[in-house]
Image (cartoon, grey):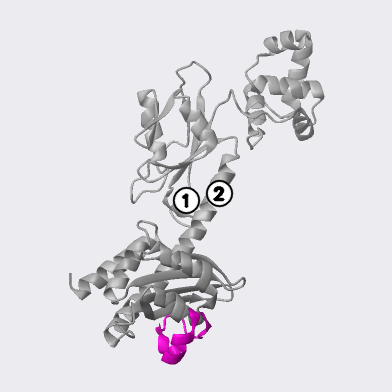
Amino acid sequence: MGQRDQLLAAIDAIYDAAIGNVSWTIPLELMATILNGRFCALEFVNKSTGQMRSIETSSAPEITREYIEEYFRTCPRFDVVKPVGQILVDYDVIDEENMKRHPFYAEFLGSYGMRYFAGAYLRNTADDLVAISVQRTSKQGHAQNGSIRHFEALTPHLRRAILASAQLGHMSAQASEYAAGLDHLSDAIAFFDGRGRIVHMNAAADTLLRKNDGLHITQGTLHAGLADEDAALTLMTRSPAGTEPLAHTHPVELAITRRSGLPSYIVSAMPVGSSGGSGETLRRARTMLVMRDPTTFSAPGNRTLRQAFGLTRAEASLALALATGDTPASYARRAHVKMSTVRTQLSALLRKMQARRQADIVRMVTRLAAPFRI
């Protein structure tokens, strides 16, 4: 492999490492080869505490371990003020005579047959310092012009890769926070890409779909048990390139028949767009689906209903019973009240909640369902 091919391979590996596709060991080993070095290190330092956050190296874990434990704080190379991206070599730091006496050079590097280096700061803020360095043996001597030119060619890519890695790490943390928040919701929520594949679902959705009661996942896509409902669900969850989510014939709400015979799931969809999301997951998502099981909704409290609609305690109890599937007659038997009393309470509910039918009462109560899982 020629030097140009080696450089291109190293650049590819640098960006692959930044996005987590490969270990940093791979590009660092390639850099050590290209720059005629023995050992390559990428260091992340917390300047406010003077502690090393982390270190990535090409190989030799024993060198890394001893450096961190005993010699990191004695390294004179971090004392040099140099612009970010500019190549730093030993004669910017120390002369040959002082190298012979300095513990970092004489004891640490010397014990591993190393002496010289070429390096650069990739990031240098009030809080953080990121540095790259390639170590050379005494026999190899100081880095020569050819190696420095190669280092200069690689440094801009390293800087961009470190920035991208930091941004991806931040977005990953944000995505984890969003995912944790979604897991607290009582509604089952799933996000889909343009081809109808699930890119994320919360804990409630995972619980609902594990029941395999009218809805199931096959090869990453969501399906219903009945053919016509499955076709409608496909329209809800897929947004082909060049089309708007839920455009034209795309339904936005659908009842899914359950094999168990329990009341149907109510599935609602809405577009979330393809930009402006925080994190990779939301950037890929085109459609959000909310799946509700009317038999397991988290009912609002009696007090909540009373305050929302000005109900009595008994009227709120009847409204909650109707929302969970009771009929007026079954509620009368269970509550040990006369049917005439229930009719009076139902009439009051219709008036106070400004509802026209019993189904309207159920819908309004379910809309007040507690949004968080307990």
Q: In this view, does 200 lie above or below 355?
A: below
Question: Where are the magenta residues, as a range?
Answer: 78-103
Q: Residue at x 44, y 81 (%)?
A: 106
Q: Distance between the residues labelled 1 and 2?
A: 10 Å
Left or right: 106 in relation to 113? right
Q: Nearer the viewer, mark 1 or mark 2?
A: 2
- Residue in front for this viewpoint, 175 or 135: 135
Residue at the disc numbered 2: 178
SS for dot 1 = helix
Q: Residue at the left extreme?
A: 1
Write down the quadrant of residue 321 in the picture: top right
Q: Which residue is drawn at 31% across and 75% down?
A: 37
Residue at the disc numbered 1: 282
Residue 192, position as x, y percentages in the image: 42, 43
Residue 93 appears in the figure: no
Contact, CB < 8 Å: mark 1 with mark 2? yes
Amino acid of disc 1: Leu
Q: Residue at x 51, y 60 (%)?
A: 170
Left or right: 66 in relation to 46? left
In the rendered image, which quarter contains the N terminus? bottom left
Between discs 1 and 2, the one toward the N terminus: 2
- Residue in front for this viewpoint, 373 or 260: 373
Left or right: 1 in relation to 209? left
Residue 337, position as x, y percentages in the image: 78, 10
Amino acid of disc 2: Tyr
